[in-house]
């Protein structure tokens, strides 16, 4: 995939078309490095950017001149070009690279396919198996390895059985 989901517009901010954005990056400042963001496949150049005391990003985008225009973007997702993304530290992954991977135990038992990852207090994975959704928080020890090279997520079965919600 050529683009990464990097945030979601929460609401307009002020009268000049600024957007309050919840970022999905490790640091809100990482969004600024993209330079251009995409909303509904339309490119918008970042004209202004700041991080508020609440940890949200506040940004002005070319083509969004006032509050009325900004209101139309409430709840929309922001994407950025993968090649503009900051490099990841070892052991960090882009969510888009994990979605669709099979989850297996260390013994090779298939647990389901990653359908969604939600950013809450900790990441919560939703996997699907036989048409049913199973949710589990990413707590210490549940994920043994994310093996992008072989295309799978290795799960500690004992921890998974304790925390998974059917």
Image (cartoon, rainbow, N blue to C red):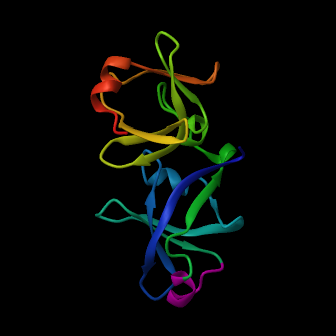
User: x and y percent of residue 71 in the render?
Assistant: 51, 83
Q: Quadrant of residue 69?
A: bottom right
Q: Is residue 146 above or below residue 54?
A: above
90 in the magenta segment: no
In the figure, is residue 26 to the left or right of 164? right
User: x and y percent of residue 44 in the render?
Assistant: 66, 69
In the figure, is residue 134 to the left or right of 164? right
Tag count in the figure?
0
In percent of the image, x 56 and y 35: which residue is there?
A: 98
Q: Quadrant of residue 72?
A: bottom right
Look at the image and give the residue range highlighted in magenta.
63-71
Q: Is residue 166 above or below residue 3?
A: above
In percent of the image, x 34 and y 39: which residue is there?
A: 165
The residue nearer to you, when weighing 151 against 32, is 151
In the figure, is residue 78 to the left or right of 18? right
The residue nearer to you, when weighing 55 against 42, is 42
66 in the magenta segment: yes
Q: Is residue 134 above or below residue 66?
A: above
Q: Is residue 26 above or below residue 106?
A: below
Quadrant in which the N terminus appears: top right
In percent of the image, x 54 and y 88: which residue is there?
A: 66
User: x and y percent of residue 141 in the render?
Assistant: 32, 21
Residue that protrudes farthest toward the front in the picture: 130
User: x and y percent of residue 83 in the render?
Assistant: 69, 43
In percent of the image, x 36 and y 34: which residue is there?
A: 138
Quadrant in which the C terminus appears: top left
């Amino acid at each position: 995939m050529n683009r990464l989901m990097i945030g979601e517009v929460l609401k307009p901010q002020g009268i000049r078309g600024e957007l309050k954005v919840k970022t999905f990056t490790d640091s809100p400042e990482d969004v600024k490095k993209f330079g251009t963001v995409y909303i509904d496949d339309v490119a918008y150049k970042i004209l202004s950017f700041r991080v508020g005391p609440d940890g949200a990003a506040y940004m002005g985008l070319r083509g969004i001149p006032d509050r009325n225009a900004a209101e139309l973007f409430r709840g929309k997702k922001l994407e950025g070009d993968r090649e503009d993304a900051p490099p990841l530290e070892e052991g960090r992954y882009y969510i888009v690279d994990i979605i669709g991977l099979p989850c297996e135990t260390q013994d090779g038992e298939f647990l389901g396919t990653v359908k969604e990852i939600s950013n809450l207090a900790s990441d919560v994975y939703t996997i699907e198996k036989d048409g049913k959704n199973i949710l589990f928080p990413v707590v210490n020890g549940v994920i043994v390895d994310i093996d992008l090279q072989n295309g799978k997520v290795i799960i500690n079965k004992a921890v998974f059985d304790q925390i998974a919600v059917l």
